[in-house]
Amino acid sequence: MGEAFLWGALGASALLVGALIAYLWKPSRQLIAIVMALGAGLLIGSVAFELIDEAVQSAEVARVGFVTLIGAMTFTVGNWILDKRGGGDRKDSGGAQVTGNPLAIVFGSVLDGIPESFVLGLTVLEGGVSTSLLVGILLSNLPEGMSSSAGLRVVGWSRNRVLGMWAIVMAASAIAAALGYVLLDPTSGRTGADAQAFAAGALLTMCADTLLPEAFEVEGILTGSLVAIGFALSIIMSA
């Protein structure tokens, strides 16, 4: 469990790095969008090769599909609630967060990090952290840290305040990774396929709701090709 906790913290540490880059370097929206699209492709590949592929080997396909939908709906409901409370523009790099609720922005960022960190904990339990998944998490968290922090900088948040927010998200992600490890412990009697399918649905929804729209807004029709490149890299790393 301790190893999963550390890997979860490492994956989320890219948020802190992204925040520092946003305050010291001020990266372009195009660069942020490119990295977001590549990270989304890698995460989608991890869903296919690390989660669903293994889940259908130990459970009925219909059951896996149903639990995947439950995971997607759970994330959607949580995201909808936070959007209504002022956390909907948490990834905007232009300062749209000025009309948002700071607490909702924090909770929204925590929500985004839970599915991927949970999955990371699952891979540690299976014998070793997934390289493709870890790279995907880093490539999704880095632009998130840059984009969100750039927007918060525009609306007047201090660097220390932003770093404190990402430190909270980092701790939550580490805990989520540890939970992913514990919930699939064979001695706990939990059903591994259900947990994998649930996490897959939540992770796919997170990519579609929070990464791809921001990437497409900047890159347009090139977004699909960038996602495909990320997916191809996931295949290569899995092999």
Image: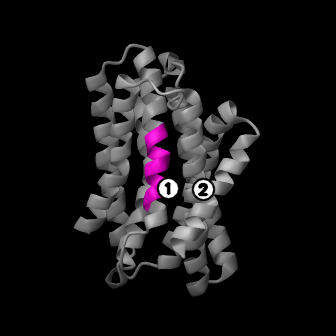
The tag on residue 28 is: none
| Residues at circles 1 and 2 in contact by the CB criterion of under 8 Å | yes
The Cα–Cα distance between marks 1 and 2, rounded to whole angstroms, is 8 Å
Which x, y percent locates residue 158? 31, 18
- Position of the C terminus, as image quadrant, is bottom right
Q: Circle 1 is placed at which residue position?
A: 136
x then y, percent, for residue 153: 40, 19
Residue lying at the far right in this picture: please name it.
221
Q: Can the viewer see residue 140?
A: yes
Q: Does the magenta stretch include residue 31?
A: no
> Which range is magenta?
134-143
- For the point 47% across and 22% down, which residue is it? 151
Q: Badge 1: how crowded within 10 Å, few (<14), some, or many (20+)?
A: many
79, above or below 152, in the image: below
From the viewer's perspective, is 80 left or right of 115?
A: right
Q: Is residue 151 left or right of residue 176?
A: right
Residue extending farthest left: 2
Q: Where is residue 230 in the image (x, y as percent from the top left)?
A: 60, 56
Q: Quadrant of residue 55?
A: bottom right
> Is residue 204 depicted above or below 28 in this figure?
below
Tell me where residue 125 sits by quadrant: bottom left
The residue at 71%/50% (across/down) is 225
Q: What residue type is labelled 1?
A: Gly
Check disc 2 and report the residue beneath it.
230
Residue 213 in the image, given as x and y percentages of width and height: 65, 38
